[in-house]
Amino acid sequence: MVKIPTLPAQTHLRFHNDEPLPNPTESHPITPDMASPIRLHCLALLVLLFTGLRCAAADRASREAEADAFFSGPILRWKLRLSDAAMDSLRNDPREYVPAELTVGGRTYPGVGVHLKGSAGSKRSVDDRPALTLNFDRFNDDQRVFGMEKLHLNNSVQDGSYLNENLASRAYRAAGIPATRATHAVLEFNGREMGFYVVKEAYDDNYLKRHFPEDKGRHGNLYDGGFIRDILQKLERDGGKGPRDQSDLQALRDATSSPLAVRPDLFSRCLDVDRFRTFMSIQMTLDDWDGYIRNRNNYRIYFRPDGRATFLPSGMDQLLRHPDAPVRDAYMGRVANALMAMPAERVRLRDRMRSLSSNVLSESWLRGQMEEIQARLDAAVALTKFTPQSAFPERHSHTHRLHARLEVVKRELAQWPDPLPPWPVGKRHSLSDARWNVYVQTGKADCLTTNEASGLRVFHLTVQEPASRATLRSSLTLPAGRYRLSGRARTRGVDPLKDDLGIGAGLRLTGVTGTQHLEGDAPWSTLTHDFEQGEDGPVEFIVELRANRGEAWFDIGTLAVEAR
């Protein structure tokens, strides 16, 4: 980069009349003979500044071209050398950078920062087969390798095909989501032959400049989702110039818990919904069970200057493990669940998956990409001691799993129905005439339907021995939405049993902890249980008494479910 020259502190600028520059603390009017040299000096500074900006832009373009050539070029042999002290440091503190020497592509780079990476299944010690992060200018200012400041070397211990990261990266980018690029390397680490590694570019400020140039230096925050963390937790900020108080994330959190009536509008302000729809489609189609949608893992979030979030994939080595995994449910990510609670979004997701299945996620396109990646790997096998069969043990089965998965997706998309009409807010459905089945889960209890002298028709539950759980259950098919289950109850002499699902007398859903209860001697009271139905389908309601002794009465005529 061209630097604008500065003058020493004691230098006196002189004009054509050899008079020193006036003291700024004194009053000196600028005369016509002074104005011309000042204009010339300012013009010179502007020329230097403009030249510097043009040179910087040309330098960035050159580096980007070098990076492009690296990711599309042949697989290279990498040699990393670390001192004994550096190795000891990584044994004691694997995440702390140490200096190393890197030789690749006929050049040697000193002062390359190295630390270990990986978590859960991919984490390995420095004396094993570690995954590595390489920061090229950590100890050597302005050093770049293939035009980049940082790269990751993944050990691919959870992907014996060595295809997943590269294949998924290509799919995301072809579908309009700027995932980081990937290639491969043959690594020699302190003289040890390590075999093939997956090379990935980093998510950092340089990534933002490269993939979001239209933001022009106004980049918002780039967050790392961490290990199985969702947006309700504080996320690590990896780059950008957005608010430091995570107010951008808070807006996204608020949208996920908002009423359905206003949720679409709130999401349109804080999330690139269209890109997220594509993000979901790719993860569900490729069975990326360890990504954000199904495991709240391996993701980044970038907030654009307008405040809208773009979800980005990371750690894409866990594809196609379960070809028959569900396509329409099993969403664990909070944002995915909140979106899929809106019936219109479920239809849009289905339609996006259908659209992508005919191009980017078609079997012919994916197979073509796999074959190209495999050909590049086979060409580099000569750099190792392996054969293709021993280097890529899961390659053959991977092709079969891809075919099986796409067949499952095709079948489920064909069977994916239009959603049920949503209930308007306030619509109430009485459960008084529903079919209720009696279950005594533990202990001994009576569950009777009786008519009281007051005319009330009630469920009467009586515990006859300690640690008894007596329930009545009824099911109803509901469209996706937010609801409240409610009913009146009273108790007498209830010594409550407390566990993970409830306490004493209460209402709840199957598998869900109750939120209100009665115990002891309680008069007639209204109990409620609010819940959200993420997709159309049956819901099982429970009326129960969990106690060591006592009895409870539930007014059947007041049992109802209402849209919220």
Image (tube, helix red, strand yellow):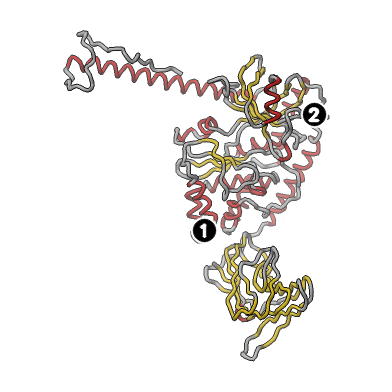
What residue appears at the point 57 percent right and 43 percent down from the top-left corner?
235
In the rendered image of this protein, does residue 278 appear above or below residue 443? Answer: above
Q: Indicate which disc residue 49 carries.
A: none
Q: Residue 414 occupies which quadrant of the picture?
A: bottom right
In what element is the residue under mark 2?
helix
Residue farthest toward the bottom in the current orientation of the protein: 453
**Label total for image:** 2
| Residue on which the image places disc 2 | 391
**In front: label 2 or label 1:** 1
Instruction: Tell me which numbered mark, 2 or 1, is placed earlier along the sequence.
Output: 1
Quadrant for the C terminus, please: bottom right
Amino acid type indicated by mark 2: Ala
Q: Residues within 10 Å of mark 2 (few under 14, many from 20)?
A: some
Left or right relative to 548: residue 101: left
In what element is the residue under mark 1?
loop
Q: What separation in Å lies between label 2 and label 1 (alpha carbons)?
A: 50 Å
Q: Residue 400 occupies which quadrant of the picture?
A: top right
Left or right relative to 37: residue 99: right
What residue appears at the point 20 percent right and 15 percent down from the top-left corner?
34
Q: Residues within 10 Å of mark 1 (few under 14, many from 20)?
A: some
Q: Is residue 372 visible?
A: no
| Residue on which the image places disc 1 | 258
Q: Residue 200 versus residue 149: which sits nearer the camera?
A: 149
Q: Is residue 557 visible?
A: yes
In the rendered image of this protein, does residue 215 appear above or below residue 444? Answer: above
What residue appears at the point 69 percent right and 80 percent down from the top-left corner?
551
Q: Pinpoint residue 146: horizontal percent, then vertical percent.
A: 60, 21
Q: Residue 336 versus residue 204: which sits nearer the camera?
A: 204
Q: Pinpoint residue 533: horizontal percent, then vertical percent.
A: 62, 62
Amino acid type indicated by mark 1: Ser
In the rendered image of this protein, does residue 3 appear above or below residue 228? Answer: above
What residue appears at the point 35 percent right and 14 percent down from the top-left corner?
8
